[in-house]
Image (tube, rainbow, N blue to C red):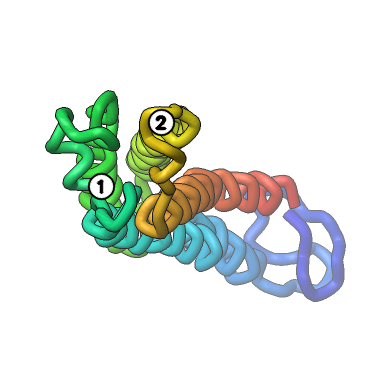
């Protein structure tokens, strides 16, 4: 045990420094307190809560954009909800995969509402990792669904029977941005516990 007053090494069981007589037990106590509170480092808490918060806002954006126009054909506009629920429509044909959009958005939103306060109040890193991973997978699945819709719509646009009148609208792009934000938020939430764990190990080596 090193004396903080004179720097000399003492026996681990020593209570007083053999050189200057300073009490060693009082010197060791702050170090133990730092190790105890290090697992609740602000950077880890803020990172976990911020990642979940970003994913939550992204999910709200996705749900909002799902109600906005995703495609148009001539003077008619179709929201994501219209396309997902009307498989007989020209634009909606083959777009049943869009049903995954609101489902994944609700999964991201629900987990975000749970993980945002949990990131501040709790220290169970396993739950944070699992929650962020599920958020990321849901966002990835929704992104794939949106991309499949984009590919399908572009194929219809090039179909001579539609006369090139089908176009992607702003609702689709807003939802895609929302999914990218959800992926980013889940990555931040997943990485934050690793940062805290790394900081603990570095502190333990000192």
Q: Residue 101: x, y in percent?
A: 28, 41
Residue drawn where x is 17% and y is 45% of the image: 82
Q: Residue 151: x, y in percent?
A: 47, 30
Residue 117 image-quadrant placement:
bottom left
Q: From the viewer's perspective, is residue 164 above or below residue 152?
A: below
At label 1, counting other C-alpha atoms closer than 10 Å, the crowd grade (few under 14, some 14-19, many 20 or more) is many
61 sits left or right of 107 in the view: right
Say if residue 62 shows up in the picture: yes
N-term mark: 1 or 2: 1
Quadrant containing the N terminus in the rendered view: bottom right
Front residue of 2/20: it is: 2
Q: From the viewer's perspective, is residue 134 above or below residue 41?
A: above
Compute the Cα span from label 1 to label 2: 16 Å
At label 2, counting other C-alpha atoms closer than 10 Å, the crowd grade (few under 14, some 14-19, many 20 or more) is many
119 sits left or right of 9 in the view: left
Q: Residue 179: x, y in percent?
A: 42, 48
Residue ID for mark 1: 80
Residue ID for mark 2: 156
Residue drawn where x is 13% and y is 37% of the image: 85
């Amino acid at each position: 045990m090193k004396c903080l007053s004179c720097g000399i090494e003492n026996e681990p069981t020593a209570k007083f420094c053999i050189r200057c007589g300073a009490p060693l037990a009082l010197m060791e106590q702050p170090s133990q307190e730092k190790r105890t509170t290090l697992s609740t480092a602000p950077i880890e808490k803020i990172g976990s809560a911020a990642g979940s918060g970003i994913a939550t806002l992204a999910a709200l954006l996705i749900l909002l954009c799902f109600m906005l126009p995703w495609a148009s054909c001539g003077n008619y506009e179709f929201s994501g909800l219209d396309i997902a629920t009307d498989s007989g429509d020209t634009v909606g044909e083959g777009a049943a995969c869009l049903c995954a959009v609101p489902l994944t958005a609700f999964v991201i939103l629900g987990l975000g509402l749970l993980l945002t306060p949990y990131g501040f109040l709790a220290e169970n890193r396993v739950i944070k990792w699992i929650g962020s991973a599920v958020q990321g997978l849901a966002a990835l699945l929704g992104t794939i669904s949106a991309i499949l819709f984009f590919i399908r719509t572009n194929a219809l646009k090039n179909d001579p029977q539609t006369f090139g009148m089908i176009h992607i609208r702003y609702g689709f792009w807003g939802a895609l941005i929302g999914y990218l934000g959800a992926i980013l938020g889940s990555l931040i939430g997943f990485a934050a516990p690793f940062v805290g764990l790394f900081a603990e190990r570095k502190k333990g080596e000192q």
